[in-house]
Image (cartoon, rainbow, N blue to C red):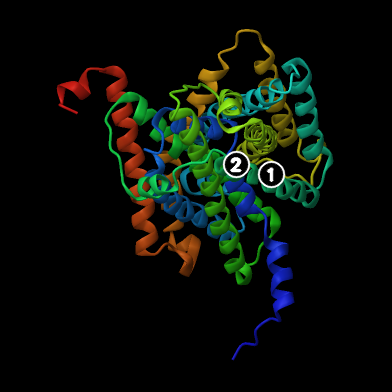
Amino acid sequence: MKKRLPTWKGVLLFLSILGPGIITASVDNDAGGITTYSIAGAHFGYALLWTLIPITIALIVVQEMVARMGVVTGKTLSDLIREKFGVKPTFLLLIALVIANFGNVVAEFAGWASAWEIAGIPPAVSVPVGAVAVWFLVVKGSYRIVEKVFLVACLIFLTYPIAAVMGKPDWMAVGINLVRPVARFDGAYLTVLIGMVGTTIAPWMQFYLQSAVVEKRVQIENYSLTRIDVIFGCFVTDAVALAIIVACGATLYAQGVTIETAGDAARALAPLAGSYASHLFAIGLANASLFAASILPLATAYSVCEGMGWESGIDKNFRTAPQFFWLYTGLIVLGAFCVMVPGAPLVAIMYASQVVNGMLLPAVLIFMLKLINDRELMGNYVNGKVFNSVAWATTWIMIVLTAMLLAVTLFPGLPALLGL
């Protein structure tokens, strides 16, 4: 019988592998995501809480698949798509991903600026400081240092559960709405619903997680620990999402306060839940925005460089991986610049980026499912029936939701015509 590791050695081994799963899932709650959840709570109360249970299940299945592919193959998602499907589909997919991610990067800096405006600091000061900070961290740091900084940033998301408790919600109503689906066929509800799925199971996450697992060089015999990391991260990120919806539902929705951004939510919380709740919400927004402003350009640079066969990695430099670092730098500079342009439609960009994520996700999932079920590639680590069922169901649900959103957008009178 195989001898079990002593407890302390097992803990140390887990801590050495901990990182990719919880970091990827935590960045999920970025400025755009916080905005989406805040709007869901402020505009619909607890009505969308029920979606978090199926979303969490789908997130676990999707994240576990890419982590498994990374460990088994030692290759990134972009690499595998290029090798199995060719350069053209890979190039088209990456173009769409860059466009969606650029909108997300702008959203992060907009969220960062909004959080600091609450403290009276203008974007002209906060945005350049934030941009330089995230650029310096990744360009001048090693993978080990960067990962440790990101893990510390994950802890700051605890501000949202505290803010939710300070909002004094009706926990019985929260529990009921978690298990009672509410179906509505109107543009606003569907847009928020797709936005929630798009921000919780974002396309960029799959590329970044697999790249992080590969760069961490996790061995197949230690994959069970990576799986724990991934699953734990998924539960944490959706617990934070629940807290944001509850905080805004218990206060803003109850008082009929409408908002457009997470910054609006932070300001509006002050007279309803107290200044401490407002400040905690703003701190969480600032942390989430800067955290994601580091990860999203990084995920994009990984995806593009690996898909095109260029060198990539935090442990490299401008000389050994020029495309990787210039793309990372360009996304940060352009994203920060857009936020500082007077009159830029930041709210539209922030919200639209989440919806675009939801519309792009099915294409990414289809590529993933083809790869994960390739026995030549994965051997005995191909998907089982349950995982395939959940993953394909997620893919088709997103296709149907996107079609419904387009239908009610193009034909606003359709719901009434159908008697819905």
Identity of the amino acid at label 2? Answer: Tyr
Looking at the image, residue 326 lies above or below residue 211? above
Give the label on residue 156, or none: 1
Identity of the amino acid at label 1? Answer: Ile
- Answer whether residue 360 is visible to the viewer in this image: no
Give the label on residue 160, or none: 2
Query: Hey, which residue is sitting farthest bottom in the picture?
Result: 1
Looking at the image, residue 156 lies above or below residue 122? below
Residue 228 or residue 162, whichever sits in front: 162
Q: Position of residue 272 (x, y in %)?
A: 55, 29
Residue 157 or residue 338, whichever sits in front: 157
- Answer whether residue 322 is visible to the viewer in this image: yes
Q: Residue at x 27, y 30 (%)?
A: 185
Looking at the image, residue 269 lies above or below residue 77? above
Residue 195 or residue 63, whichever sits in front: 195
Q: Residue at x 52, y 37 (%)?
A: 247
Q: Residue at x 50, y 22 (%)?
A: 259
Label 2, secondary structure: give it. Answer: helix
